Every structure is written in C-alpha cells, then in structure tokens.
Image: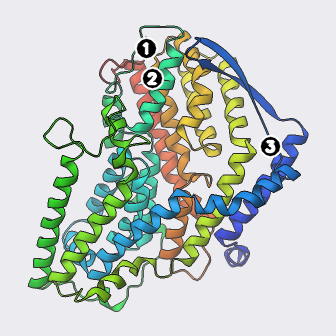
C-alpha cells in the first residue's frame, strides 16, 4: 500500500530538477539575507605572498539575479558542451546500431562470455578511461547499455554500472591526466611557499592508483552483480532479440572488414599524436610542456576534436559493416543510420535543458564556492594531525564535491591552505592531493550539479520499461551502494599506506 502511494506521488525527474532550481533560488535569497560568506587565502605566485579572498552568496531572487536567469538561460543551453558532444556521439553510435554492427559484434562478445566477466571488463575500462577526461561519459554509458541489451540483460545495469565506475574512478588514473596536471601546478605553488625545491613527479602516485583501480574494479563488479542487477526488473526484449543469435557469413565478413578499416583509421590517428617521428605529432599542442597537456590540454587539437574523432571511428565501423553485410544499400540508408540514435531524443534534450539551467544558476549563486571555502577553514582551524586530519580532508572533499564538482575549482580554493596544513603535520603534498581526489570519487556520481549526471538520468529513463516514473531519488539510490563501497575501499587503502608507509609511486610518499 505504501509503495503504491509512493509511486503515485513520485515526481518526474524533470519536475524534480525544476523544484531544485527553485530551491536554489530561495536558498540564495535566505543565505544572502544573513550575509553568509567565508574567506580563504590564495597565493600570488609572482610575488610569493598570500592574498585573502572572500566568497559570498549572490541573491538569485534579486533583480540582478533574475536578470541573469532570463538573459542567460538560452545562451547557457546553446553553449552547453555536453549537448553538442552528445548529439555528435549519438550520430556515430546510430550508424553502428542501425547497420547491425553492434548486434553482430556484441552478440558474439556476449554469447559465450560469462555475465560477471563482461561486467568486470566494462568497469575496468571505465576506471582506466579517466585519462580521456569527460568523453567516456558520452560514449561508454550508451554503449554499455547496448552491450547488456544485446547480452539479453537489462540495459540499465550497463548504464548504472558504467556511470558508477566512471564517477567512482573519476580521480583515479595510472597516468597523469590534464586535470591532474592542473591540480599538481596548484599543489606545487602551495608547497613552494614552504619548500622551494619541491617538484611533483608525474608518476608519484602510480602505485596507489594501480592498486586502487584493480581493487575497485572487483568491488564495483560485486555490487553490480549482487545488488544492482537483483534490484532491476527483468527486461522484455523485442522479437529480433528474442531469437537465437546466429550471424551469417556475410555478417562475419562485414565485421572483420569493419574492424580492419577501423584499425587503419586508428593507426593514422595514433601516428599523429606521437611526437618526434617524420610528419607525426600533428594533433599535439607543442606550447605545453607535459605530453598529457599536449594531448588533452584545453587548446589541444586532439582534445578539442576527440568527440569527432571517435564519432568518425564509429561511422567507419558501422558503414563498412553495413555495406558489406548489405544493410546499407544506398545513400538514403546511410542518412537514416546517421539519425537513428537521434530518434526520440526530444525528452533527452529537455533533461539537458533543465540540467544546464540548474548548473548555471547554482554556479552563479556562488553557494558552492562559499561551502568549499567554509570547509577549507574547518580543516585549517581543526588542529587535527595524523589520520584524523587525513579523514577530515577526505570527508570535506566528499561534501565539497556535491556542491562544486569541478576539481580545479575546488582545489584553487583549498590548496593554498590545506597543503601547508598537511606539510606542517608531516605529510607530503602528493598525499594531500591524493586524499582530495579520492574524496571526489565518492560523491561526484550522486550530485545533480555534475554535468554528466543528467546524461545518466536521461539514459536511465530511456532504458526503463517500468510503468512507474523513474525519479531522481531512484537514480541516486542506485549510486549509493557504489559510493559507500568506494569510500570504505579508499579508507582501507589509506590506512594501509599510512601505517606501513608504502611508497605512493615514484618519489611519492605519505610522509615528508
């Protein structure tokens, strides 16, 4: 009876986001009335001195705030990078799906492979893909749903597990990412105020990261198979998926030739991101010093064009397969395939519109920065040492990420105060940045302020066959087991490294 009542009053996710937007506006009004603000210190690296900065709330219910909302909502939606990237990526996925490439490839992949093995591989790929920045959120989430669909399982298992792995591994990377590079620069500036000889080795966290990725992939696989998969209902398939999958010779030939064509394409792309060879490295930004910044930096050709590069790869695989397997016979078939994944995207666009509006209003209200500044003051004034200080930063990073998902934005506020605090407590700058990143991993998947949360929500809704509306509470409820086990896993690893003093990586240690 209670469940029936709960289902009747359950709000559609779009309505929930609109209510959150209204709540943010009212909250900014109340906080501004009480002059809610916090100050924090930043460092002027050229002068080598600390500068005090104050973060205060902007009242979104004032004339100024309302003007911003009405004047910028359309522009924020039009300039929302997630929107354009998603549409372009879906074009490539549509060609692969419409041509039958995905059904053949994924059918062969899932036919004789154990369910748990497929889940583990997807999660491991998600954890390793953080080096590519935010792009995996656009490509891997829909593809994971299709893998589970063609494996005759609920596609939302793939959507949930891939999003969970991407977010829980958001701060994990065996190799330095462009975000790590930006954070390391801030850490270095803060450290040099006390130690002018400090340098941040790009491999200083590699051992901890490797162990974390391997352990977390096993833990997240267990949660997916033993908790999430059992919560979701059995998926009802369309007729063509109910039949036993037996690819014909021409389909197998198409698959082989499409893979061969994609390999040639990838060789060309890879050659152009390798420096030092004849006519190579054309996609790199040589103004940067680190290779990862040359590759994935803000002004890198490869980084800016990565979505299109992946889309072309998908189109090549789908088109070659379709032509050989006679699924694409003329230009009309090809154009139909290009728009296949965009059919019924209207509701997804509504999700993105309300999501971009929420993010824009919340960011402009400055509530997030004020919260982060307050948490920074809490860490500095706590007088904690040892593991107590470590766990305080870990918890504060978890809370801060709910309000400010952007790593660099948070660390810009926190680093100049937190890094010296840890150094004075005898712990290294690398370890400090590591704890900050681990805290991010726990909560970034459950905050609606995260840009790709709305994509996860939209795909959940598309893959749901339930008559009851899927709510924001449901989407977060799916993530909570992952966040909990991720937190416990990191706590266990932190304690292990702290007590035994295992090196974090190359020239990276817990203590100074």
In the image shown, does 471 or 304 lie closer to the viewer? 304
Q: Could you tell whether 178 is left or right of 119 in the image? A: right
Neighbor class of circle 3 (other Cα within 10 Å; few <14, some 14-19, many 20+) is: many
Location of residue 92 with respect to 281 vertically, above or below: below
Nearer to me, 135 or 290: 290
Q: Where is residue 202 in the image (x, y as percent from the top left)?
A: 34, 27
Q: How far apart are marks 1 and 3 (CA)?
A: 40 Å
Is residue 110 visible to the viewer in this orientation of the structure? no
Give the spatial CA distance, label 2 vs label 3.
Answer: 35 Å
- Answer yes or no: is residue 158 visible: yes
Residue at image position (22%, 89%) is 329
The quadrant of the image that shows the N terminus is: bottom right
According to the picture, the residue beneath numbered tag 1 turns out to be: 511
Mark 2 Cα-neighbour bin, 10 Å: few <14, some 14–19, many ≥20: many
**Which element is circle 3 on?**
loop
Its colouring scheme is rainbow
Mark 3, residue position:
58
State which mark lies toward you, 2 or 3. 3
- Asked if disc 1 and disc 2 are in contact, CB closer than 8 Å, the reply is yes
């Amino acid at each position: 009876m209670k469940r029936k009542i709960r289902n009747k009053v359950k709000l559609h996710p779009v309505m929930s986001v609109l209510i959150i937007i209204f709540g943010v506006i009212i909250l900014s009004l109340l906080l501004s009335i009480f002059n809610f603000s916090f100050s924090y210190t930043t460092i002027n690296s050229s002068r080598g001195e600390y500068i005090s900065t104050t973060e205060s709330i902007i009242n979104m219910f004032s004339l100024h705030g309302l003007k911003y909302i009405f004047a910028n909502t359309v522009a924020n939606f039009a300039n929302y990078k997630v929107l354009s990237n998603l549409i372009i990526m879906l074009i490539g996925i549509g060609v692969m799906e419409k041509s039958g490439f995905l059904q053949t490839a994924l059918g062969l992949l899932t036919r004789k492979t154990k369910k748990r093995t497929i889940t583990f591989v997807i999660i491991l790929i998600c954890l390793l893909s953080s080096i590519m920045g935010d792009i995996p959120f656009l490509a891997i989430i829909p593809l994971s749903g299709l893998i589970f669909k063609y494996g005759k399982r609920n596609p939302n298992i793939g959507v949930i597990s891939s999003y969970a792995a991407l977010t829980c591994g958001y701060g994990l990377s065996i190799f330095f990412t462009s975000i790590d590079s930006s954070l390391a620069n801030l850490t270095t500036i803060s450290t040099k105020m006390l130690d002018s000889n400090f340098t941040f080795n790009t491999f200083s966290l590699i051992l901890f990261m490797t162990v974390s990725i391997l352990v977390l992939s096993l833990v997240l696989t267990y949660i997916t198979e033993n908790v999430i998969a059992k919560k979701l209902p059995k998926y009802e398939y369309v007729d063509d998926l109910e039949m036993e999958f037996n690819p014909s010779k021409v389909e197998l030939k198409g698959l082989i030739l499409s893979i061969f064509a994609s390999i040639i394409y990838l060789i060309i792309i890879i050659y152009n991101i390798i420096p030092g060879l004849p006519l190579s490295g054309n996609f790199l930004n040589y103004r940067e010093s680190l290779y990862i910044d040359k590759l994935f930096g803000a002004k890198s050709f490869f980084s800016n064009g990565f979505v299109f590069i992946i889309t072309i790869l998908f189109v090549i695989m789908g088109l070659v397969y379709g032509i050989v397997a006679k699924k694409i016979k003329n230009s009309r078939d090809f154009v139909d395939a290009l728009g296949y994944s965009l059919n019924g995207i209207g509701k997804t666009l509504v999700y993105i519109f309300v999501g971009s509006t929420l993010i824009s209003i919340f960011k402009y209200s400055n509530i997030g920065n004020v919260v982060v500044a307050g948490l920074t003051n809490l860490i500095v004034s706590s007088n904690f040492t040892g593991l107590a200080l470590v766990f305080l930063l870990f918890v504060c990073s978890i809370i801060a990420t709910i309000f400010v998902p952007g790593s660099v934005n948070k660390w810009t506020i926190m680093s100049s105060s937190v890094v010296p605090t840890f150094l004075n407590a005898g712990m290294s700058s690398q370890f400090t940045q590591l704890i900050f990143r681990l805290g991010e991993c726990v909560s970034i998947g459950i905050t609606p302020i995260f840009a790709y949360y709305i994509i996860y929500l939209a795909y959940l809704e598309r893959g749901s066959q339930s008559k009851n509306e899927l709510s924001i509470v449901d989407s977060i409820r799916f993530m909570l087991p992952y966040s909990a086990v991720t937190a416990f896993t990191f706590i266990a690893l932190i304690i292990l490294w702290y007590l035994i003093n295992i090196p974090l990586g190359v020239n990276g240690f817990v203590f100074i």
